[in-house]
Image (cartoon, grey):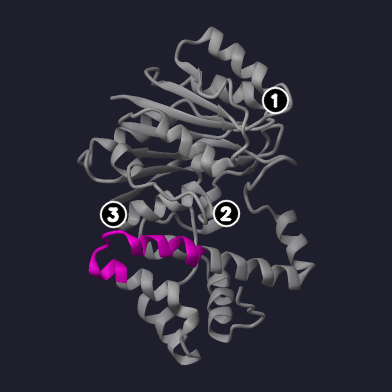
Amino acid sequence: MKVNILMSTYNGEDFLVQQIQSIQEQTVQDWKLLIRDDGSSDQTKNIIAKFVAEDSRIYWINENDATNVGVIKSFHALLQHEEADCYFFSDQDDIWLPEKLERSLAETINYPEDLPLMVYMDLTVVDQDLQVMAESMIRSQSGHANTELVEELTENTVTGGVAMINHALAQLWTQTDDIIMHDWYLALLATAFGKLVYIDQPGELYRQHENNVLGARTLSKRVKKWLRPSLLFSLYWDLIEKSQKQASFLLEMPLSADKRELVQAFVTVLDKPMLKRWRTLKQYGLKKNKAFHTFVFTTLIISKFAYRRK
């Protein structure tokens, strides 16, 4: 089985060495690591060059092209660079646990090769010094792991750094504009056309530090939003609208009748009168993973409080 690990880097000099070393220490050793740098201005490129010179499994695919295209397009370019049976996504600042590849690859034998498949794991959240902040990101942040389309429409529980996709799913990813993040969109594709599988074990130490682009929803991040309710509502509506836009791309693809009906209901729910908005949420089971978040989501959709159509 051909395994490609895809890593996009950007000014990652602080933790990149540890991340690549954790990949080299996997129990599965037959892999290729493809790295695309997205225009770093620190020592990241020198670090990549050193690893490429020392390990024949590591490739720098854009050594002569420093164009900054953003994380989504960077990962898409990595995916398109070379065909493999399975693809793993790697961030630049985490630490993979030794059996991450082995456990994910073991799941692939349970499904046919032509079925679009995504496998993902839990994460242990740590600070920049690797002190544990949460043993389970799934339990602390989302309550449970999503495996169905109705869940992924409104909330993503897949983190790219612990995700693997097969080639059948990779072929479905043609959209890079107006998606929230590659891991969420790929999870939507997996639940719409194939299978999304969760392994209830941590696959990596998910490092939180001041330069995180996204990261876990920590208490400090929540407090900052609670102290500015107008910003909080704006961010919430922005997420709803972006998730609807992202889901709308599925309607351009050959969905089954029941899944098309579900996606259409989510995408158009705000266009309906108030009573029909409530009925739509109830009929299709559109909600969030945790009770409080479902309450906020449902209240906003039904009331359209603070809603400003763009």
Mark 3 crowdedness (10 Å alpha carbons): few <14, some 14-19, many ≥20: many
Question: Residue 225, how many percent across, how many down?
Answer: 74, 64
Label 2: which secondary element: helix
Quarter of the picture containing the C terminus is: bottom right
Which mark sits nearer the N-terminus, 1 or 2?
Answer: 1
Residue 106 placement, left or right of 297: left
Looking at the rendered structure, the kind of residue marked 2 is: Ser
Amino acid type at circle 3 is Phe
Residue numbers of the magenta segment:
243-260
Q: Which mark is residue 13?
A: 1
Residue 292, image x, y percentages: 58, 71
**Circles 1 and 2: CB atoms closer than 8 Å:** no
Q: On the rendered image, what quadrant is the N terminus found in?
A: top left
Task: Tell me whether the residue at label 1 lies in contact with that at label 3, contact meaning CB atoms closer than 8 angstroms.
Answer: no
Between 266 and 73, the residue placed more toward the observer is 73
Q: Which residue is found at the position 54% from the left and 28% from the top?
A: 36
Q: Does the magenta-highlighted stretch encompass residue 170? A: no
Is residue 217 visible in the rendered structure shown here? yes
For disc 2, the marked residue is 140
User: Which residue occupies the foreground of this view, 304 or 150?
Assistant: 304
User: Could you say where residue 265 lies in the image, as x and y percent from the top left?
Assistant: 38, 76
Real-space Cα distance between discs 3 and 2? 29 Å
Q: Name the residue: 53% across, 58% down.
A: 142
Residue 193, labelled with which disc?
A: 3
